[in-house]
Image (spheres, grey):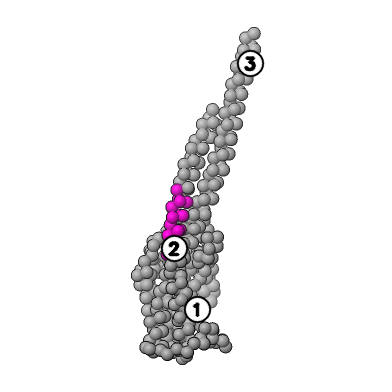
Amino acid sequence: MAQIREIKKRMVAVRTIQRITKTMQMIATAKFTAALQRSKATRPYTQRIRELVAEVAAAAGDVVNPLLGGRVLGGGGKAVGKEVLLVVSSDRGLCGAYNGSVLRTAMAEIRRRRAEKREMIVETAGKKAVSYFRFQKIDVAERHAFGDKPSFAEVAALADRYMADYTAGKVDAVYVAYMRFVSTSRQVPEIMQLLPLVQVLPVALQGGQAVKGATTVYEYRPSAEALLNELLPKSVKVSLFQAMNDAIVSENVMRMVAMKAATDNAGGLGRTLKRNFNRARQAKITTELTEIVSGAAALE
């Protein structure tokens, strides 16, 4: 009888867990849909402004901007040996391998920089990253909280600070460790170089021979330098904002998948417990019938 009661309690607990995970799956699905719409809405603008910066920089020729090509104005134009790594994680768990993948990628980058005798200043966006680096005994310089719906103003303010530190020569580069959203079935942990903006430079400005997309002759009004001074900060801001949006989409899709798997596993365990419960009850009934028949036979 004790075994039947224990199985019954486990069945109730599994059904409760299944309802919770199903609810979390539905919530994650709703958040994923909304986050995906925001990410898709900003991606064309982000891609186009990068292409525009590349075209203008290629056609402008020898225009110099401190945000391009790792040029540092402060410190006598010399590298200071300090770099910033912003690690974007989640505030909550139960999202599969999301945090583990991002944090392992970030830790590998930190170890690589340490091996090169460079100082990596770690900043975080998300509580899970804070806990991880505390366990790794790595100091976190800044902790940022953007929530599930980061506003462009908050992200732009952070980008402004990074650009100010970079142009002043306080840091040599700024990187972002985040989960890049590719599709609902594929999310890739990535280290994005935010500063300097070498990823938007055309091939010719990086020492190559060909200039992709630079065949158009432009007349600048105002000057090319003024246009780049306006476009380059925008490119940094929208790139960081797009990374934040991709991270949130990836978090929610991975939580949705994890909660669906948990719901399915709870359903399978519930069926197994129900089968065990029926077997235990049938065995008890059989035992009682055997005892009754044995007792009746003994009285004859």
Instruction: Indicate the quadrant where residue 185 lies.
Output: bottom right
Percent of width and height locating residue 101: 53, 62
Residue lying farthest to the top in this orientation: 300
SS under mark 3? helix
On the question of residue 245 being in view, the answer is no
Considering the image in quadrants, where does the N terminus appear?
top right
On the question of residue 215 being in view, the answer is yes
Percent of width and height locating residue 178: 48, 67
At a point 49% along the width and 58% down the height, the residue shown is 253
At a point 53% along the width and 44% down the height, the residue shown is 266
- What distance separates the C-alpha of mark 3 from that of mark 2? 72 Å
Q: On the rendered structure, is 221 left or right of 287?
A: left
In this orientation, which residue lies closer to the viewer: 157 or 133? Answer: 157
Question: Between disc 3 and disc 2, whose residue precedes?
Answer: 2
Percent of width and height locating residue 293: 62, 16
- What distance separates the C-alpha of mark 1 from that of mark 3? 86 Å
Q: What mark, if any, has residue 199 been given in the picture?
A: 1
The three-letter amino acid code for the residue at tag 1 is Gln
Question: Between disc 1 and disc 3, whose residue precedes?
Answer: 1
The three-letter amino acid code for the residue at tag 2 is Gln
**What residue range appears in magenta?**
23-38
